[in-house]
Every structure is written in structure tokens, then in C-alpha cells.
Amino acid sequence: MEVTIFAPYRQNLKRVMVQVQKFTVNTFAECTHVIWDETCEAVIIDCGVYKFGERERLIRFIEVQGLRPVRLLLTHAHHDHLYGNDLIRDRYGLLPEVHCADEWIMKEHLPIRMAEIYKNYPYDIPMPEHYLTDGEQIPFGNHMLRVIHTPGHSPGSVFFYCEQAGIAFSGDTLYDDDIGSSNLVGGNYEQLMDSIDYVLQLLPDETVIYPGHGAKNTLAKIKAHNPALNGGSIF
């Protein structure tokens, strides 16, 4: 679990705070993020907690901080990013939300894939009632997350971008030192590169990127040292 990161900014001459907490969880070292502001309304992004201790730590953190989760979001519908969705549903009454292009992965591919990986998967897999679309605005407290559709790693991969705080959650599209794979179900290399090129031009260089695996960094530093963006190989 990473120490809470504070993302200060100025709006209408008032200093306010958005806070982000990262939990590195499950055997895939997936990054589960909790984001909230001064109202204590919170959004949980990519809830990959699997082991009992991981699930317990997440709930304890939310309760100790006095947070009120209002949305449960997925950057994409791959299994390592959603192990804990049943926990959040049962505890806070929230169902996952994922881009509509990943609906078929959730409904058709995911149950098959989970049966292949786990002999006896211990949790059920909640299905969304609402599917996200490009440009959709997701409110929490006094702030907003914007959905940016970035297909390539999966058809429905997205960034969640909070312009006010200067932060974005990139899922498995873009990492600090690499880019996501495009050889999984529904992946497409050309789409992935087009998506990355789009967000590199769209987002300010000072935007802090929180990926689905690995360390956060500013977009400027990622542009400068990520080998996959500078003629290097990808995995």
C-alpha cells in the first residue's frame, strides 16, 4: 500500500485537495486506486483486491478515513482489475462501470477466462448496469472524472482524467516505463498506438499518470524516458 498522494491545485483562488491512495494487490501486482476530495465522496478504480488481507485493508482504509464510495470504475474488463467488485457491491451497494465496448468481455469472455485460471474461483462477478461512453463525466464530491476512450489493450480501455487535479488513471494502456500489451482478447496494436498518441497530445505534460501496474509519474517524464515511446520494444 502506497502512502496517500495529495494532488493540490487552484480553482477560483481557493486551494483544494484531491487525494489518491494506491494499493498494490493480487499476484499480478495490480494497482487499485481510491480517489476522494474534501467532501469525502470517493471513487474506487480497478478494485483488484483478491486475498482476504487485501480486501480487509481496503475496507479498513475507507472506514478509517471516513470515505463514502459513490462509484466503482474499471479502466477495462480484465480479471486482475476486478477481483474485489463483489466486496464493494456487498459493502457499499455499488456495481462496476466499464466502457460499453468491453461489455462482451464482461458478459461472455470473463466467465470462461476465470474458469480457465481458477479451479474454484471464490467470488461471484457482478455485472454492470451502466456502461460508460467516451467523454462521459463522472462526478464525485466537488470534482469530475472524464472518460477518455483508449482502445487497444482491450476494446473498451479508458483513461479517467480529473482535469481539476491534474491526474489521470491509465489502466493498462500506458505505464511509466512501457505500454500495455495488445495481444490479449480484443487487443489491437494499431488502436493502442493511436490511443497513446491521442492522450499524449490531449493531456498536459504536468498530468500525473496513475497506471494499472507500477509507479506513477508525470506525462512529461513518461514521454522522456519510456522506451516504448522512443523506438523501444513492447511486451
Image: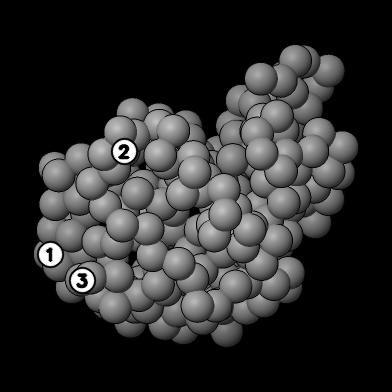
User: Callout 1: helix, strand or loop?
Assistant: helix
Residue in the image at 55% along x and 38% along y: 217
Residue at position x 12%, y 64% from top? 64
Q: Which labelled disc corresponds to residue 64?
A: 1
Q: Position of residue 100 (x, y in %)?
A: 66, 67
| Drawn side of residue 181 relative to residue 128, left or right | right
Q: For the residues carrying marks 1 and 3, which lies nearer the camera in this image?
A: 3
Instruction: Give the image location of residue 81, x and y in percent.
Output: 44, 47
Give yes or no for contact between labels 2 and 3 (Cβ–Cβ under 8 Å).
no
Q: Nearer the viewer, residue 189 or 105?
A: 105
Q: Name the residue rendered at 23%, 70% in the picture.
A: 90
- Find numbered disc 2 in the image and state the secondary structure of the residue it sits on: strand
Compute the Cα span from label 2 to label 3: 19 Å
Query: Which callout, 2 or 3, points to the residue nearer the camera?
Result: 3
Q: Earlier in the sequence, mark 2 or mark 3?
A: 2
Compared across the picture, whether 85 is left or right of 191 comes to left
Give whichever of discs 1 and 2 has the lower sequence position. Answer: 2
Q: Residue at x 61, y 25 (%)?
A: 177
The residue identified by callout 3 is 91
In the rendering, which numbered label is found on residue 25?
Answer: 2
Query: What coloring was used for the rendering?
Result: one colour
Q: Residues within 10 Å of mark 2 (few under 14, many from 20)?
A: many
Q: Name the residue type under label 3.
A: Arg
Mark 3 is surrounded, within 10 Å at the Cα level, by few (under 14), some (14 to 19) or many (20 or more) other residues, namely: few
